[in-house]
Image (cartoon, helix red, strand yellow):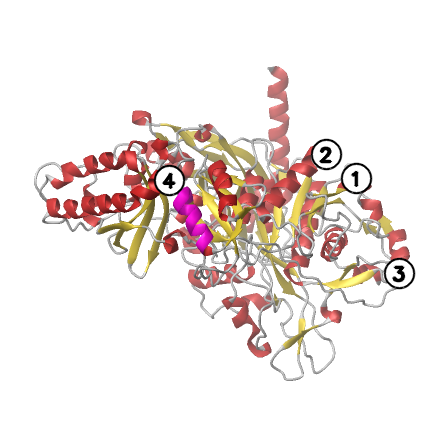
């Protein structure tokens, strides 16, 4: 069947003022009877804490007097949690630092300024003087009804990482999450307590993060002297994983392969390897990575690969698996080039160990300062000491920030799910350990493509001793099944080849298997040209190479579109689908996503359409927010897209089944402190949703279903049951900043579904007027494909849609010329 380029639809969506449908929230109120007594106890607790902290406050000489204060913890039952909006008022001078929900308790940790204690007391008076159920409810009634206790904050309250903080006198690497504008006070005080603060910092919308080294006792003293720490976490470091096993090929094989290569253009897209450096003089790499394109964020760290991991990843990003190429005489067409920045410190005593996020940020700035190019960033390393519960870490947030970028400058990152490497596991039931091993940071980055590892490598000899069945998960690939609920996103996004393992002689453990691994370029190429690699590192590098190939094929595609096309092309293998029960529920599909993502991307599908499998691409933007009533910030607009629809072909197909695939891709600006405050729905600046036109709707009826501003006075809502035809379901598909689902039904039904809306959902931009971020527009990519379920069906879907798109383009050009 003929191959065709995907179709870019130049029609902009119709912008429509938007107000969503408010959910019905039934609050069960349990008002307190003796309110005055309750307030007296709370105020007395604040006074006692202030008296206890008075001496420490007096010692805060580096801090302006108006900003001096102490920590407090507000407690409530998790069954009747406090509404945290109480702390939003800047007039109260109380900074909400973090919120914990544990063992039936909700604890809000705050910083109370001593000059604002009277303001807090004033906020309690109306409540203290009121009676439950009588007259007009006082301000903050629900807050004080639910608030049970105020107490001084303990050290453990500020610890927001997994597990317990280290013991009192154990030297430890810390992440100090500081209130904005306070870094200098910490740096000035730390040397007096023999605490080392590494150079550099990370800047987030409501926090500054620095790396400190000291004992728990020293950090406690620092916090007492300079109480600007909002959170304490374990500081991370990069971990690289290298399998340097020689498969036996000689230099002659590499030379023969070079003669088969069709080189990419000089201005071809680039994969930037963020790793241990790259040995660019390797014969198979040198022609495709210029001397000035191997850089390092620290001059003490070698740019030419001090470890070996980076050179292996470069080979995979450029070639994929070298083994089949070495065994063939066919031309090897390369679509992209390479770059490299060393971000992994060498494992030598005294080497600086900055936060991984600072190294990644510095690497991006360094590379983009030296040359302009279309590029993707490939980070094939994890930070094992950062959070692995799915909540944002400093590194994952930095990657989300860099991906979001600024208008016209957004970036595409690839990161690994991480490997299981701490323990032996049962070969007979290896998937149980995959499911119990949560993915490592920065896998939780919403804007990045997170790559797990699968395998098609199996032993051909009998009896087979490979561990993973063909098409199933790689034995060492981590998953998000063990992440803490609710999860923010579906991860991994995809899986790619990571090799297999073989069972040990005891039949219990497993061993590395060179013959079931990926062949790549070796750092020490004078001794041997090739080495073996695999797992999620190699899978991540391979995925970045696919992205660069899409960039080369579609130069006008945005990073959001490239990401969407990769996910859109992915499919689950039979082995993956066999993990589903006979009658799967949406929850079963959710677990499938958390293990395999959306499956294995297909290069041909990502790059081309077929006659009976047409893909169209819409690149547009949305004004998410507008100024609402009373100077508030309200949701702004939705977009409605009238699609170029293959009416004639769908009518002809009639009852034949077809599939409609929809992928919506966009980037969000992150705010990690909102997640720490139990506001996970506010981590993103805003979110988007897609809604497909119903079979019996016209456009205006479909819009009114989701937009109350477009409803007539006599509007009556109707239930829409068509979500049952979506495979994944809205609850699963709408997580994160990339949404994908598949509708299956008769062509005669799809005939009437030629419209789709993109809607905004409120995030933290809508809570923050200063900075005017809410005025920005949010670019998005909408990728849709129509394909026949019968892959051999002779249906000219592509041709009909292409004719409509071409006609639209001609009319658009004529209009522009006429103007």
Distance from label 2 to label 1 (Cα)? Answer: 9 Å
Residue at 68% across, 47% down: 607
Tag 1 near tag 3, CB within 8 Å: no
Give the residues drawn in magenta, as a range.
Answer: 217-229
Between residue 810 and residue 735, name the one nearer to us.
735
Q: Residues within 10 Å of mark 3 (few under 14, many from 20)?
A: few
Distance from label 3 to label 4 (Cα)? Answer: 71 Å
In terms of secondary structure, where does tag 2 sit?
Answer: helix
Tag 2 near tag 4, CB within 8 Å: no
Tag 1 near tag 4, CB within 8 Å: no
The residue pinned by badge 3 equals 253
Distance from label 2 to label 3 (Cα)? Answer: 35 Å
Q: Nearer the viewer, mark 2 or mark 4?
A: 4
The residue pinned by badge 2 equals 370
Q: Which mark is residue 292?
A: 1
Q: Nearer the viewer, mark 1 or mark 3?
A: 1
């Amino acid at each position: 069947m003929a191959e065709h380029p995907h179709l870019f639809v130049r029609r902009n969506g119709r912008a429509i003022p938007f107000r969503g449908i408010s959910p019905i929230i039934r609050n069960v109120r349990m008002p307190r009877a003796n309110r005055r007594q309750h307030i007296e106890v709370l105020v007395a607790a604040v006074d006692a804490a202030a008296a206890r902290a008075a001496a420490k406050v007096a010692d805060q000489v580096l801090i302006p007097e108006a900003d001096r204060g102490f920590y407090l913890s507000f407690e409530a039952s998790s069954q009747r949690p406090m509404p945290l909006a109480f702390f939003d008022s800047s007039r109260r001078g109380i900074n909400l630092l973090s919120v914990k929900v544990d063992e039936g308790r909700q604890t809000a940790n705050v910083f109370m300024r001593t000059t604002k204690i009277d303001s807090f007391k004033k906020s309690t008076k109306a409540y203290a003087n009121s009676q439950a159920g009588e007259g007009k409810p006082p301000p903050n009634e629900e807050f004080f009804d639910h608030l049970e206790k105020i107490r001084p904050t303990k050290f453990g309250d500020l610890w927001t990482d997994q597990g317990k903080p280290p013991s009192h006198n154990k030297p430890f690497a810390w992440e100090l999450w500081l209130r904005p504008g306070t870094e200098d006070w910490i740096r000035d005080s730390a040397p007096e307590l023999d605490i080392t603060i590494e150079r550099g910092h990370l800047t987030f919308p409501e926090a500054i993060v620095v790396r400190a080294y000291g004992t728990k006792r020293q950090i406690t003293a620092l916090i007492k002297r300079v109480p600007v720490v909002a959170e304490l976490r374990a500081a991370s470091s990069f971990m690289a994983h290298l399998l340097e096993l020689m498969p036996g090929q000689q230099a002659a094989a590499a030379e023969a392969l070079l003669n088969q290569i069709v080189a990419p253009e000089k201005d071809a897209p680039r994969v930037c390897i963020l790793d241990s450096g790259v040995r660019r003089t390797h014969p198979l790499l040198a022609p495709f990575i210029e001397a000035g394109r191997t850089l390092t964020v620290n001059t003490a760290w070698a740019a030419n690969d001090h470890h070996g991991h980076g050179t292996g990843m470069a080979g995979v990003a450029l070639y994929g698996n070298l083994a089949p190429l070495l065994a063939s005489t066919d031309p090897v067409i390369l679509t992209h080039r390479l770059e490299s920045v060393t971000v992994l410190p060498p494992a030598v005593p005294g080497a600086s160990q900055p936060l991984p996020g600072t190294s990644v940020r510095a690497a991006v700035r360094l590379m983009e300062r030296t040359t302009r190019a279309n590029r993707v960033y490939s980070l094939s390393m994890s930070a094992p000491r950062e959070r692995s519960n799915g909540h944002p870490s400093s590194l994952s947030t930095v990657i989300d920030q860099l991906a979001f970028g600024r208008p016209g400058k957004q970036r595409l990152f690839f990161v690994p799910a991480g490997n299981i490497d701490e323990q032996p596991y049962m070969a007979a039931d290896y998937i149980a350990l995959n499911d119990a091993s949560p993915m490592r940071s920065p896998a939780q980055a919403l804007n990045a493509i997170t790559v797990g590892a699968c395998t098609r490598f199996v032993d051909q000899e009998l009896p087979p001793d490979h561990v993973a069945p063909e098409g199933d998960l790689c034995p060492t690939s981590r998953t998000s099944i063990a992440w803490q609920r609710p999860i923010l996103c579906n991860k991994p996004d995809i899986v790619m080849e990571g090799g297999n393992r073989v069972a040990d002689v005891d039949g219990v453990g497993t061993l590395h298997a060179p013959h079931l691994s990926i062949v790549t370029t070796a750092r020490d190429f004078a001794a041997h040209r090739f080495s073996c690699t695999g797992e999620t590192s190699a899978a991540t590098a391979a995925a970045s190479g696919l992205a660069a190939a899409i960039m080369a094929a579609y130069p006008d595609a945005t990073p959001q579109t490239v990401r969407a096309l990769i996910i859109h092309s992915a499919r689950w293998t039979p082995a993956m689908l066999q993990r589903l029960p006979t009658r799967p529920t949406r929850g079963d599909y959710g677990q499938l996503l958390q293990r395999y993502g959306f499956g294995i991307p297909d290069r041909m599908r990502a790059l081309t359409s077929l006659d009976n499998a047409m893909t169209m691409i819409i690149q547009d933007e949305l004004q998410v927010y507008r100024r609402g009533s009373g100077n508030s910030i309200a949701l702004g607009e939705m977009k409605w897209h009238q699609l170029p629809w293959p009416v004639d072909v769908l009518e002809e197909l009639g009852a034949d089944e077809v599939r409609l695939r929809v992928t919506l891709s966009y980037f969000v600006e992150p705010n990690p402190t909102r997640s720490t405050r139990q506001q996970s729905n506010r981590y993103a600046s805003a979110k988007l949703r897609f809604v497909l036109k119903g079979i019996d709707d016209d456009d205006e009826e479909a819009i009114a279903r989701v937009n109350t501003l477009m409803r007539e006075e006599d509007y009556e809502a109707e239930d829409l049951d068509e979500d049952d035809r979506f495979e994944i379901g809205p609850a699963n598909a709408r997580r994160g900043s990339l949404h994908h689902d598949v509708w299956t039904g008769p062509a005669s039904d799809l005939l009437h579904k030629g419209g789709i809306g993109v809607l905004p959902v409120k995030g933290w931009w809508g809570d923050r007027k200063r900075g005017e971020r809410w005025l920005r527009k949010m670019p998005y990519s909408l990728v849709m494909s129509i394909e026949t379920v019968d892959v051999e069906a002779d249906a000219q879907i592509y041709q009909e849609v292409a004719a409509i798109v071409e006609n639209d383009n001609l009319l658009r050009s004529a209009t522009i010329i006429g103007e």
